[in-house]
Image (cartoon, rainbow, N blue to C red):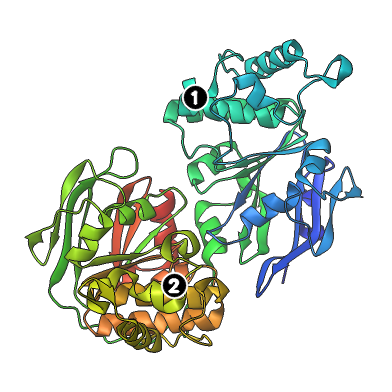
Amino acid sequence: MHPDKSSNLAAQTDDHPILSLNRVTKTFPGVTALSEVSLDLYPGKVTALVGENGAGKSTVVKVLTGIYQPDSGQIEIDGSAVRFPTAQDAGAAGVTAIHQETVLFDELSVAENVFLGHAPRGRWGLIDTGEMVRKARDILTSIGAEIDPHTKLKELGIANKHLVAIARALSIDARVVIMDEPTAALSQKEIEELYDLVADLKAQGKAILFISHKFDEIFRIADHYAVFRDGALIGNGAIADVTEAALVKMMVGRDVSQIFPEREHNIGDEVLHVKNYQHPTEFADISFALRRGEILGFYGLVGAGRSELMQSLFGITRPSDGEVRIERAAAVIRSPADAVGQGIVYVPEDRGKQGAITALPIFQNVTLPSLGRTSKNGFLRLAEEFKLAREYTQRLDLRAASLDTDVGNLSGGNQQKVVIAKWLATQPKVIILDEPTKGIDIGSKAAVHEFMAELAAQGLAVIMVSSEIPEVLGMSDRVIVMREGRIAAELSGNDLTPETLVRHAAGI
C-alpha cells in the first residue's frame, strides 16, 4: 500500500510545500520505476531521499527536472499543477539539480560555465560579458567560493569545480535545490563547507531535496526523510522521529527467500589471492581470497569502488601497489590480455559499451577473445567459430534467430549471455560478473542465476558485484562489503542479513 497525501509531511508542519509530487507513476518497458509516489518539499527545509540502488531516486530527480515525463499523477508548485516538458521549463519554474557528476567544460571560464545557456544579454541580443562576470562573482561570493570568474575551469581542483557546479545550479535563482550525492568527491573539510552552504540555502527559504547514502549526513542536516523501495514511497516523516535502524528496515524490507537456485557448496582450493592492493584514487588496502567453486559477492553503495577494483584486477587500470596470486603463483597483470592469459575474465556492468560489439554478429562476439582456437596459419575457420559459439550460447540458453544475428538486435538479457559466453569460451579460472542482472527481465535474471550456480558447481571461481541486496544474499557464499574504496566487512553465514549489509555499507 502506497502512502498517500494524507500521510505525507503536510501533517507535520504548518508551512505549505513549494513543490509536491502527487501520486506520480513512471514506467519503462517491463519496469515500474515509480509507483504512485507522493512527496512534498518545504521552504527552508531539507528532505533526505533515502533508498538502496535502484529504488527510484534518480527517476524522481529526472521527473522533477523535466528529463522524464510522468505517466500519471502531477507535479505541483505552490499548489498549482505544472508540467516540465524540458529541463529548461523546470529551471524556469525554479527547480535545479546539483548532480554527483555535473557536466562542465574545462576550456570555458568559470563565469561561462555558470551561465552557459542562459547568459545575460545586452543590446542586439549579444552576451553581456561584464554583467555575466559580475553576477557569477556575486553567486560565488554568496556560497563562500573565492574563485575568480575569469579563471579557466581546467585550472581548478575538484572541490572548486564542484562549487562552480553549485553556482551554476543557483544561477537560475532556484526555489527548489536537488542535491544528488553532493559530497561523493569532497574531502571532510569541503563537506563541512557544503553543510554551511545548505544552512545558507535553508535561511534563504529554499526547499532542498538531499539524496545521500551516508546516514551521518542525513541525520546531521535533514529535517524530513522519505524512504523509497522498488519505486514506491515506503515511509516518511520528521528526521527527529526516526532511528537509523528504522530507516534501514524500511530500505531493505523485502523477502529474499524462494527466488534463487539451490546450490551445492563444494568449495575447493584457493584460486585467487589479493593482498594489500591499492590504487592512487579509487581503492586502498584490499586483501581477500577466492576459492574454486565459490561465489564471492561484493556489495557497496555508490562510489564504494567495487567496479574500479574489478577493472584493475582485469588490467584495465594499473594499481599503485599490492600483490595478486593465481593458484599460488605471482601474477603480473598489465592489460586485459594479461588477465585473460592468467585465467581472469570480466563481464562489465555496461555490456553495450564495454562488453560487446553490438554491430557484430553473435558468433564473432563470442569467439573474439579465442581466435587462437578458431584459426589456423593466420586464417579464421568459420566452421570452428560457429562450433565454439554454438557450444557456449547453448549452455546459456541464448534466444536468437541465428548466430548471425547482430548483438545490437538482442534483448538486454541475451546481450548479457553473449558477453558471458564470450569469456567462458576462454576457459577461465576466475570470472568477475559486474552487476550481472542489471537491466534485464525477471526470466533472464533467473537464467543468469541458474548459470552462475552451474559455473560454481563446475569448479569455476566467481566474483559477483551487485547492488541488489536479494541477489547478494541469495547467490553468495561470502560477501565483502566496500565503503569509500576500502573493505568495510567480510560477512558469511548468520551475519549475512540485509541490515548488516546496509549498516556496513553506510558506515553505521
Sequence-wise, the earlier of marks 2 and 1 is 1
Identify whether 335 is placed above or below 132. Answer: below
Q: Residue at x 8, y 63 (%)?
A: 328
Percent position of residue 369, x then y: 30, 69
Residues packed near mark 2 inside 10 Å, few (<14), some (14 to 19) or many (20 plus): many
Q: Residue at x 32, y 57 (%)?
A: 310
The amino acid at mark 2 is Glu
The reply to whether residue 265 is in sight is yes
Locate the N terminus and report the quarter of the image it occupies.
bottom right
Task: Give the amino acid type for the residue marked by disc 1 in the picture.
Answer: Lys
Residue hosting label 2:
471
Residue situated in front as seen by the camera: 449 or 149? 149
Q: Secondary structure at mark 1?
A: helix
Q: Is residue 294 visible?
A: no
The x and y percentages for residue 383 are 33, 86
Find numbered disc 2 in the image and state the secondary structure of the residue it sits on.
helix
Tag 1 residue? 154
Q: Residue at x 83, y 40 (%)?
A: 15
The image shows residue 7 at horizontal and vertical percentages of 77, 59
Per the model, the C-alpha gap separating discs 2 and 1 is 41 Å
Q: Is residue 28 above or below residue 319?
A: below
Q: Position of residue 489 (x, y in %)?
A: 30, 56
Q: Is residue 427 above or below residue 126?
A: below
- Looking at this view, is 29 or 472 the one in front? 29
Q: Is residue 366 left or right of residue 272?
A: right
